[in-house]
Amino acid sequence: MPGTHRKNIHPGLYVAIVLKADQRTGKLTQGFVQDILTSSAVHPRGIKVRLDSGEVGRVQHIL
């Protein structure tokens, strides 16, 4: 399930994100959502979240 819709994402969800520094390579980082940072309902590149580890990136997959 892609992470482009805010309604599908909530704190505690296990997701794979791409960090800003990894956008060129597409390397994914996995973790649990702590905060949702995107305020719009839909974002074409993925909803921006903060993981419980403190890393910030856009959701690519909901695991």
Image (tube, grey):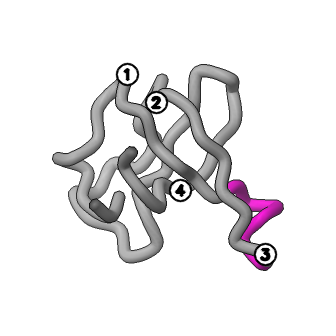
The residue indicated by pointer 1 is: 12
Q: Amino acid at mark 2?
A: Val
Instruction: Point out which mark residue 31 bears.
Output: none
Checking the image for residue 33, the label placed there is 2
**Image spot of residue 20 (x, y percent):** 73, 60
Q: Which residue is mark 3?
A: 25
Q: Residues within 10 Å of mark 3 (few under 14, many from 20)?
A: few
Query: Do tag 2 and tag 3 residues touch (Cβ < 8 Å)?
Result: no
Question: Upstream in the sequence, badge 1 or badge 2?
Answer: 1
Q: CA distance from mark 4 to mark 2?
A: 11 Å
> Mark 1 and mark 2: span between their CA atoms?
5 Å
Q: Reading the chain from its start, which is encountered first: label 4 or label 1?
A: 1
Q: Residue at x 63, y 58 (%)?
A: 18
Is 2 on the left or on the right of 33, as rendered? left
Q: Nearer the viewer, mark 4 or mark 1?
A: 1
Check if mark 1's residue and mark 3's residue have beta carbons within 8 Å. no
**Which of the two labelled residues, at mark 1 and mark 3, occupies the earlier sequence position?**
1
